[in-house]
Amino acid sequence: MIEPRLFYEEQTEVTSDDYYTPKWIFDTLGLSYDLDVASPPGGAPFVPCDKYYTQKDDGLVSEWYGRVWMNPPYSNTAPWIDRWLRHGNGVALLPMVQGSKWQTPLWDSRAACKNLLNVKFHRPDGSLAQPWTPLWLWAIGDDCIQALRNFGKIR
């Protein structure tokens, strides 16, 4: 178990969207990122990035640059997907909810994907939590798609 103090000491309010990507996903991808566009206050503990945007920074309106990591709030994913697709360079961890309005643009895009099994997120208190929906890792941009192949066969 991870020490709770490692998780976002600046964070004062925990929401239902506060699930953090496990380290093994970043280890398998083997990439570093210029920007985490949807980070909790203080930055996520495992995301290998140079800079991050928190809710206070509003990653939906702030400038995106370089290779981005995105694990957006699952309660409001659609605008994040649209922005990520327009940016065209990065990796995103997304829920796949049947009938979601953003599913078709993803499938119709040039992005590649891989479904992930047995993902357990970290919570701010250091505990682990099973997601409520299947998760898919999406990549867009040549180097990101190549890194996604580290998980096996991709679409």
Image (cartoon, helix red, strand yellow):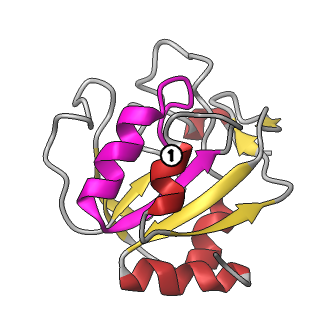
Tell me which residue sits at (25%, 59%) in the image: 87
Image spot of residue 12 (x, y percent): 46, 14
Camera-side residue: 59 or 50? 59
Above or below, 99 relative to 109: above
User: Which quadrant of the view contains residue 130?
Assistant: top right
Left or right? Give the position of 140 relative to 67. right
Above or below, 16 relative to 149: above
Q: Residues within 10 Å of mark 1 (few under 14, many from 20)?
A: many
> What kind of element bears circle 1?
loop
Image spot of residue 139 (x, y percent): 48, 69
Image spot of residue 35 (x, y percent): 29, 57
What amino acid type is highlighted by mark number 1? Asn
Magenta segment: 71-95
Camera-side residue: 100 or 71? 100
User: Which quadrant of the view contains residue 128?
Assistant: top right
According to the image, label 1 marks what residue?
A: 71
- Do we see residue 133 in this rendering? yes
- Do we see residue 36 in this rendering? no
Image spot of residue 153 (x, y percent): 72, 83
Asked if residue 5 lies in the magenta stretch, the reply is no
Tell me which residue sits at (69%, 28%) in the image: 125
Left or right? Give the position of 138 relative to 36. right
Tell me which residue sits at (24%, 29%) in the image: 58
Which quarter of the figure is the N terminus placed in?
top right
Tell me which residue sits at (83%, 59%) in the image: 117
Above or below, 41 relative to 16: below
Left or right? Give the position of 106 relative to 56. right
